[in-house]
Amino acid sequence: MASTTVENYLKTIYKMEQKNPDQLVSNGALSDEMNVSPGTATSMIKTLSDAGLVDYQSRNGCKLTPGGEQLALHVLRRHRLIEVFLVKTLSYDWSEVHEEAEQLEHVISDKLLDRIDKFLGRPRFDPHGDPIPSADGEIEPRILKSLANCMAGVSAKIARIMDQNPEFLQFVDSKGLVPGNEILIESNNKVADAIEIKLGDLSLTVSGSVAEKILVETN
């Protein structure tokens, strides 16, 4: 098993690549994301490059190699299955499982992870709607869009919450804006920065900044 630091870097690079798939991950952006100095990030990138886990272009940035991506996906699989386990079996709130999983993802064995996966019924998504990679690193493709980009009259199902800050999760939970719930977009006023939503019998209004962090599947 790779070190905790290596796993955290690979996982972070993977997530950054998913946001901007056509761009290299810059040293500066990575150092900000990891909350380390640029020099520390550059040193680790070189270490990962020497290990064949990233392709590194000096002054431009890096991207994961196929081997690096597989390791990153395995870390994400551990993290997301642990989150499901904590919510489903230990009654954790979905707003508090991220930090627990951050610690446990680095120590759980593959054998125990597979037992948990089987026990949970091979879940495809974690409590926040993030896809759980399969044991061989496959992710189920979905076409999602930000709630902020949905037009009035569109019916949609909430699929994924992109901000795992506990306060944000508690807020959307209090509004019923959680993965699996069906909504109707009644209006989307860009000028007023307000999106009106129908959730069952409830009418809700959220800001564009909140809606931007909620991904949906449209019907």
Image (cartoon, rainbow, N blue to C red):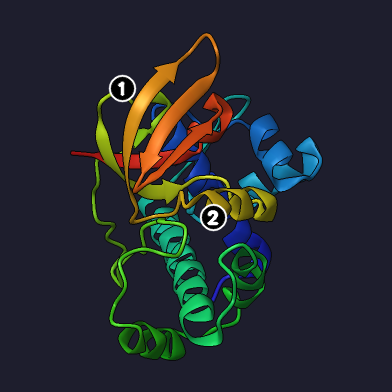
Circles 1 and 2: CB atoms closer than 8 Å: no
Extreme residue in the left direction: 219
Mark 1 neighbour class, 10 Å CA radius: few under 14, some 14 to 19, many 20 or more: some
Extreme residue in the front direction: 201
Residue 19 coordinates in the image, percent (x, y): 46, 35
Residue 48 visible: no
The circle on residue 173 is: 2
Residue 92 coordinates in the image, percent (x, y): 59, 76
- Res 42 → quadrant: top right
Q: Is residue 133 above or below residue 9?
A: below
Task: Determine the residue positioned at 27% across, 40% down.
Answer: 156
Residue 56 lies left or right of residue 189; in this view the side is right
- Res 152 → quadrant: top left
Q: Is residue 178 above or below residue 57?
A: below
Task: Determine the residue positioned at 31% across, 21% down.
Answer: 151
Q: Is residue 57 above or below residue 39?
A: above
Q: Is residue 43 above or below residue 96?
A: above
Say what amino acid the circle numbered 1 marks.
Ala
Q: Nearer the viewer, residue 73 or 181?
A: 181
- Res 107 → quadrant: bottom right
Residue 97 visible: yes
Describe the element under mark 1 as helix, strand or loop: loop
Q: Earlier in the sequence, mark 1 or mark 2?
A: 1
| Quadrant of the drawing holding the N terminus | bottom right
The circle on residue 112 is: none
Task: Determine the residue positioned at 44% across, 28% down.
Answer: 196
Residue 208 coordinates in the image, percent (x, y): 53, 25
| Quadrant of the drawing holding the C terminus | top left
Describe the element under mark 2 as helix, strand or loop: helix
Q: Say which residue label 1 marks.
A: 152
Task: Determine the residue positioned at 35% across, 49% down.
Answer: 159
Say what amino acid the circle numbered 2 marks.
Asp
